[in-house]
Amino acid sequence: LAKTTQPISMDSYEGQEVNITCSHNNIATNDYITWYQQFPSQGPRFIIQGYKTKVTNEVASLFIPADRKSSTLSLPRVSLSDTAVYYCLVGARVDNYGQNFVFGPGTRLSVLP
Amino acid sequence: NAGVTQTPKFRILKIGQSMTLQCTQDMNHNYMYWYRQDPGMGLKLIYYSVGAGITDKGEVPNGYNVSRSTTEDFPLRLELAAPSQTSVYFCASIPWGAAPRETQYFGPGTRLLVL
């Protein structure tokens, strides 16, 4: 299982762009990179997922360099409601032998007014 | 679809008591997971199941047991509650044969306090 490393916490102000970087040096060929968001007293929810290069959806962008040893979640123009913990996961292939996701401590993002 | 549901939402246990945390999903997902999350920490995998009748240990299985008699239900059993099991418990599911791009669906969590 690929281990991930993220900053423990980050502060930002409303309207700014926030970039959270995750390191995953031993990522495997079949692994995808997935980011989840968790608000207090709630379960994590999916934000974005990618394999290589850049992925963008209505919520965020995910940048993955060619060597795939790191990835950067980009949140454009954050608001107070983006205050949450963000988790980077590197997932192995789902098959008959099961699946095992490893959540790190995540990055606690605080958006200030 | 209700998605992943968990009961109860909150429970206080005395040391040594037992209880079962219920998890049900109505999405016909084969894979189901139990995590615990201690205050200010990430999620740790307790047990997971790849289908009815098949379960396996995760990172922190001690003090817990699971069963999977149906596709829909994946209960987590605490036999002798200890203060160290005070945590928030999340259940999650994912469909079988999912490509790596499939994501997990999480329940709302059960907050457990052992005194």
Image: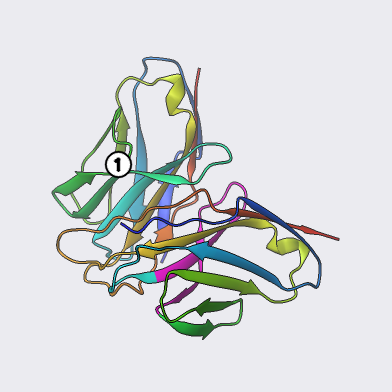
Which chain is mark 1 on? B
Left or right of residue B98, residue B21 in this image: right
Q: Residue A12, percent across and down? A: 77, 62
Q: Residue at x 39, y 55 (%)?
A: A3
Query: Looking at the image, can residue A101 be seen?
Result: yes
Q: Is residue B43 above or below residue B19?
A: below
Q: B22 or B35: which is nearer to us?
A: B35
* Mark 1, secondary structure of its residue: loop
From this view, report whether residue B7 is shown above or below residue A39.
Answer: above
x 27%, y 72%: residue: B98
State whether residue B107 is above or below residue A27.
above
Q: Position of residue B64 (x, y in %)?
A: 29, 32
Residue matched to label 1: B75
Q: Which residues are magenta?
A: A33-51
Tell me if residue B3 can be seen: no
Residue B111 image point, x, y percent: 51, 36
Residue flagged by tag 1: what amino acid is it? Answer: Pro
Tell me which residue sits at (66%, 52%) in the image: A9
Left/right of residue A110 with respect to residue A38 in the rendered view? right
Membership of A44 in magenta stretch: yes
Q: Residue furthest right?
A: A113
What is the image's colouring?
A: rainbow
Q: Quadrant of the C terminus of chain A?
A: bottom right
Quadrant of the drawing holding the N terminus of chain A? bottom left
